Amino acid sequence: MQKSLHIDPGKCTGCLQCEMACSYEHTGTINPSKSRIKVFDFEHEGRKVPYTCTQCADAWCMNACPVDAITLDLATGAKIVSEATCVGCKVCTIACPFGTVNYMADVGKVQKCDLCGGDPKCVSACPTAAITYVDAEWTGLDRMRSWAAKANTTAVAA
Amino acid sequence: MGWNRKVLRVNLTAGTCTPEPLNMEWANDYLGSRGLASKYLVSEIDPKVDPLSPENKMIMATGPLTGTMASTGGRYTVVTKGALTNAIACSNSGGFFGAEMKFAGWDMIIFEGKSPKPVYLFVENDKAELRDAAHLWGKTCWETEATIKSSHQDPQIRVSSIGGAGENLALFACIVNDLHRAAGRSGVGAVMGSKNLKAVALRGTQGVSGIKDFPAFMAAANAGKKVLADNAVTGQGLPKYGTQVLMNVINEMGALPTRNHRDVQFEDAGKISAEAMHEKRPTDGKAHLVTNAACFGCTIACGRISKIDETHFSVKNSPKYWGASGGLEYEAAWALGAANGVGDLEALQYANLLCNEHGMDPISFGATVGAAMELHDLGILTKEQIGVDAVFGSAEALCKLVEMTAHGEGFGKELGQGSARLCAKYGRPDLSMSVKSQEFPAYDGRGIQGIGLAYATSNRGACHLRGYTIASEVLGIPVKTDPLVTEGKPELVKAFQDATGVFDSAGICVFTSFAWTLADVQPQLQAACEGDWSMDKLNLVGERIWNMERQFNLAAGMTAKDDDLPPRLKTEPAKTGPAKGKVSGVEQMIPEYYKVRGWTPEGVPEQGTLSRLGL
């Protein structure tokens, strides 16, 4: 089964544990400025929204890369940046409609979410299950269930 | 190693920013944040210094767990000699500012001297410079934060600033970070204002790399988070209701100080409670509460984000207050509400918003309004003197007075001096509900005896966060004690005070202690920091910090007389509720407390105590 990250902003408290976990996994330091998932705080509305790469099936970043530094991880579906190959041209950061590929000035490469090889650390760090890793074909299952629960029916014996 | 091992020393007189190594010997003895910054302060200033003079210093400090994945590891502390109290001050704040200081590579920033003109400090990793703040002076905390982010073209900067209250040297001015978190108490904002320091803006991209044993630390941090999640208070109560969960509980106990402590139960407590914040308003069909929110790294998320009723008289012509914003927390709701007999939730939120916007401690501000209302009630202060009909229960008066105090206008200037100075000026010092000139928080020392002793002996003036015996006396954490008795309370207060010193110095939030004991913190510290951080060591560090702060206050001229409650708490029995007929037994508890502390009957640490603690 292919899985994908699923984000429910309504559950996010803005604690940034996901950003810390992401940076620790990828850099060995706790450093939200290096996180590949970002939590946005729309303070005047009281909303916090975690946002990261959705791993497009037909990925703009991968198609745009002139040196084939972005490849598909067949096991997870993640689009992976090979730092060894990346030349830091940033074309992928322009191609991505969502802004989730970003340039790291200190190393001259780009970075994006790689799903941590199938065990996304942001998911296990999230204290409220605002970020989950679920069946890619059924990301709507929980929402369907909650609407189904509201259906005005009574249990009927056969 | 937990620490960055780097201190930024900012000399405001000379306009210099100089890095220096952290004194690791002191870090080993005082841990970080509150304890370590206090060690720097007591070593560098004359305890008798005027808090608002250039000779006072102000330190912003993080702990070894600040900026880490330890739950609630986002705290920072402001340590100075308090403008309100003339005692050592240590005001702790959450939000995101503390972690950013750590990510920029610093453990603490020491401010000394006084700038000849308004400035703000801008720190971007290793770079630190003082910048002209002429364009920021006169701006609110909210405007200051927005202006700095916009002028640096960097929305990810974190800002701590003072508003008009700090600029005007209101003695309960606070330092606001991330719009609605604050180093709130003891007048640290006035000290900042006296130094012509408008704001501190930080941007850190270096992260925390110096954890001693990362795998062990992650395991310990995860174990700690599980304890918080599984606990009914930190896992359910605080996220759902916030600290406001206490309003009805404390009222039912007959320990909710009302109308300047004349009463111990508030007839409108239900209207300003957590439950009320969840209810839909008749005016717009919406609940006051929008959501809960977390500070950096916090897996509890007790913070309240609310939207005020746009049709309320206080804001109907001010759309800038209509958006979601912080509040109400329990202490603010009590001080602005019950302490003045005001049962209008929206009015309390308006006053709370102005406290955040202009940088005022809502506890001291609200309690000072309560004292003024009593002076008015007794005919000592007239409506003309105050500028508004300040009768107990008047939401209109509260809203007008918060505006006047925020802007330092008219009688607001007098309110800005706090209740002790106000009541002394009008010949009734007994009507200030304070210790060491700092106003009480939201628990009555008659109905909850231990907290009364904690107020009386708190090193930073009356405060619930120096020894939160409410946990034991009300919630049964870690064991239930009878709130109405004095027996055993000196030991209880000491235990809470010492443990709190460690929580504060580690860089985590004291609210974790609803679920955690020091035994839950210890493995996290041991994995993060070099050296021995055993339970024995931590207990010793907590007690050492307390005694160090005490010695500073004694050297500043305080005596056992300052460890006392106002006469009302000792002579006017609680009128209603389970504590009816009770007064505070503080005078019986103090001698025992001194004994338990290893202090002389005059409240001075004995030589044996000092040498045991390495002081």
Image (cartoon, coloured by chain):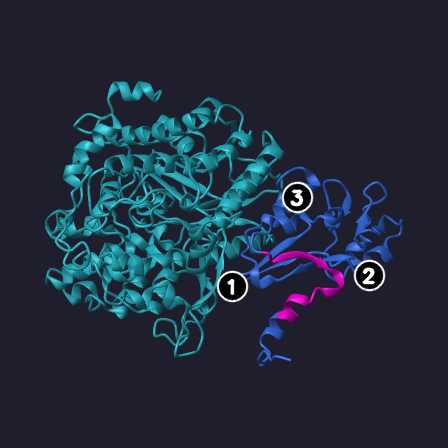
Chain colours: A blue, B cyan
Q: Nearer the viewer, residue B383 or B438?
A: B438
The location of residue B578, given as percent across then percent down, is 19, 56
Q: Which residue in the structure is indicated by mark 1?
A: A46
Determine which residue is flagged by label 2: A57
Which subunit holds the residue at mark 3?
Answer: A
Where, quadrant-wise, is the C terminus of chain B in this rendering?
Answer: top left
Q: If you read the primary sequence from the N terminus, does the residue marked by circle 1 or circle 3 appear first?
A: 3
Residue placed most toward the observer, B611 or B147: B611
The amino acid pointed to by label 1 is Gly
Task: Report which quarter residue B77 is drawn in.
Answer: top left
User: Residue B191's quadrant in the figure?
Assistant: top left
Q: Is residue B284 above or below residue A123?
A: below
Q: Give the amino acid type for the residue marked by disc 2 in the picture.
A: Ala
Tell me the mark number nearer the camera, choosing from 2 and 3. 2
Q: Name the residue nearer the viewer: B157 or B16.
A: B157
Inter-mark Cα distance, 2 to 3: 25 Å
